[in-house]
Amino acid sequence: MADDPATNTLILCVLDGHGEHGDGVSAQFRDQLAMEMMSHPSWGSDIKRAAADAIAKVEHQVIRNFRIDTEFSGTTLSMAIIRGNKLIGVNIGDSRVILGLEKNGKLVAEEFTHDHKPDSPGEKERILAAGGRVFAVEYDDGIDGPPRVWLGHMDVPGLAMSRSLGDAVAHTAGVISDPEFTEKELDPSSDRVIVVATDGLWEFVDNDETIELLFPTPGPAEAVDCLVKEANARWMQEEQVIDDTTIIVAHLFDYKSSEE
């Protein structure tokens, strides 16, 4: 998280590294991205351009860093940028930003960014056009896993997303690092909560459940604790392992939950 008082801007960002050096890729974005964005000449007038250029610049630095092998390692990125009442979503991969809107005294979920899955319309076509393949691997119990991206001639890398940062091998098969932007004008009369989280949450807890779970919590810190606890319990129930999970919850317009 970072804020820029000069432009009245708040940046909420989560990263989810994968592969042997995924922690190195995500750490470099964590440490450099916000500063690169805020120092961009277009930051004050064109947030999307500043964000896209800064993401590309940091990714280039990561790829050139000899200490980080990005052949089979990378990270997702999901970011909410709030400036005044304008909200901009920035997404690469399968982390996600959602909103909680108040309707008839209840909070309802609204998906704000959209996951980049290999079988999504447009994403799959691009991968196939680049010579890559998209298919799911059948596990020993006969259940298919998620659709994954593979090279045309070899069963690697098996990436379960169609956009990522790093992942040099996957990028030769049509995976790209271009951010997808969404934007809206926040409504002080209805927009109450924003959640930015990695797929450790979204794998087994959907948007509606997320908002239902956080609704009774007194504040953002308690909401994060509640969501992490629920996500961990479902991972243990479904997979007997727990995925790394990063969650940010922010209340909008001085929102106070019904339990406060």
Image: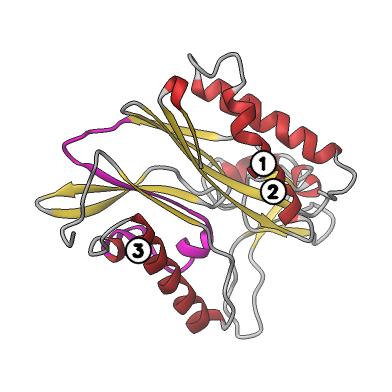
Picture coordinates of residue 55, whole percent (x, y): 65, 32
How many neighbours does mark 2 have within 10 angstroms: few (below 14), some (14-19), or many (20 or more)? some
- Disc 1 marks a residue whose amino acid type is Asp
Above or below, 119 relative to 12: below
Give the quarter of the image for residue 89. top left
- Disc 2 marks a residue whose amino acid type is Ala
Pair 3/2: label in front: 3
The magenta-colored residue range is 185-212
| Residue labelled with disc 1 | 31
Element class at badge 2: helix
What is the C-alpha distance between the residues marked 3 and 2? 26 Å
Pointers 2 and 1 in contact (C-beta within 8 Å) = yes
Farthest residue toward the right? 66
- Disc 3 marks a residue whose amino acid type is Glu
| Residue labelled with disc 3 | 222
Pointers 3 and 2 in contact (C-beta within 8 Å) = no
Which residue is pictured at 44% across the width and 21% down the height? 7
| Image quadrant occupied by the C terminus | bottom left
Q: Earlier in the sequence, mark 3 or mark 1?
A: 1
Give the quarter of the image for residue 88. top left
How many neighbours does mark 1 have within 10 angstroms: few (below 14), some (14-19), or many (20 or more)? few
